[in-house]
Image: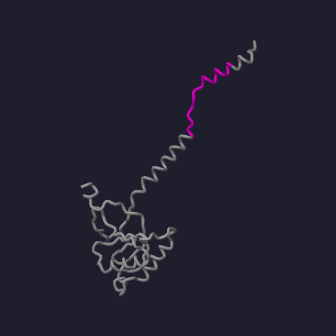
Amino acid sequence: MKASAKARRLARHHKRGKKTGALNLVSLMDIFTILVFFLMVNSSSDVQILNPKSGIELPVSSAEKAPEDVLALTVLSDDILVNGRSVMKVDALQSFGGDVEPALKAELDYQANRSASPAPEAGRAITILADRELPYELLKKIMSTCVEAGYGAISLAVSQDAKAGAGA
C-alpha cells in the first residue's frame, strides 16, 4: 500500500533529524593557516641579526634596548662596506685630509635615495659595525660623512653583555 503524502513528508523529516552534524573543515583550515602565518611573522620581528665580518671584535654593552633594522656600515681591517658592498679602502680614508669623504658620502646619498620613506627630522638611521680598536680619527671621519649625508641617528654596534641579558 502506498503511503500518503503526509506520511512520506513525516518520514523524510524524521530521517533528517537522525543525521549527525559535520564540521566544516575548510573554515577551520583557513583559520589555522592565518594563525600560523600571523605567529610566524610576529615571532621574527623582534630580533635583528647583524653579522659582523670575521676580524671585527665589537665592544661589549649592557644596554637592553633592541636595535632597529637600519643601514649598516661595516669597517673591516682594509675595506669599508655599506650594506655588504665595498665602498672604499680604510687606507684611503685615513690618508684623506678632510672630514667628509666624497666616495663614502656618494654611496650614503645613493642608499638614502633608494629608500622610499622620507627622512625623519633627526636624520636617517645608520649602524656602524667596527672593531673596538678602530682609531677615533677614522671613526670621526666616518661619522662626519654620515651626518653630512643626512644620517643623523648614528648607532654603534656592540655585543650584548651576557650578565645584562641574564637580568643581573
Across and down, in percent, residue 127 comes to: 38, 69
Q: Is residue 83 visible in this depiction of the protein?
A: no
User: Where are the magenta residues, as a range?
Assistant: 10-26
Q: Residue furthest top?
A: 1
44, above or below 17, in the image:
below
Give the vertical position of 144 relative to 12 (above or below). Answer: below
Residue 13 located within the stretch drawn in magenta: yes
Residue closer to the observer: 38 or 76: 38
Q: Name the residue nearer the viewer: 64 or 110.
A: 64
Residue 50 vs residue 16: left or right? left
Colour scheme in use: one colour
Residue 33, x across and y down, in percent:
51, 46
Residue sticking out furthest to the front: 121
Residue sitting at x 53%, y 42%: 29
Residue 44 to residue 13: above or below: below
158 shown above or below 15: below
Q: Position of residue 45 (x, y in %)?
A: 43, 57
Residue 166, position as x, y percentages in the image: 27, 54
At a point 57% along the width and 32% down the height, the residue shown is: 22
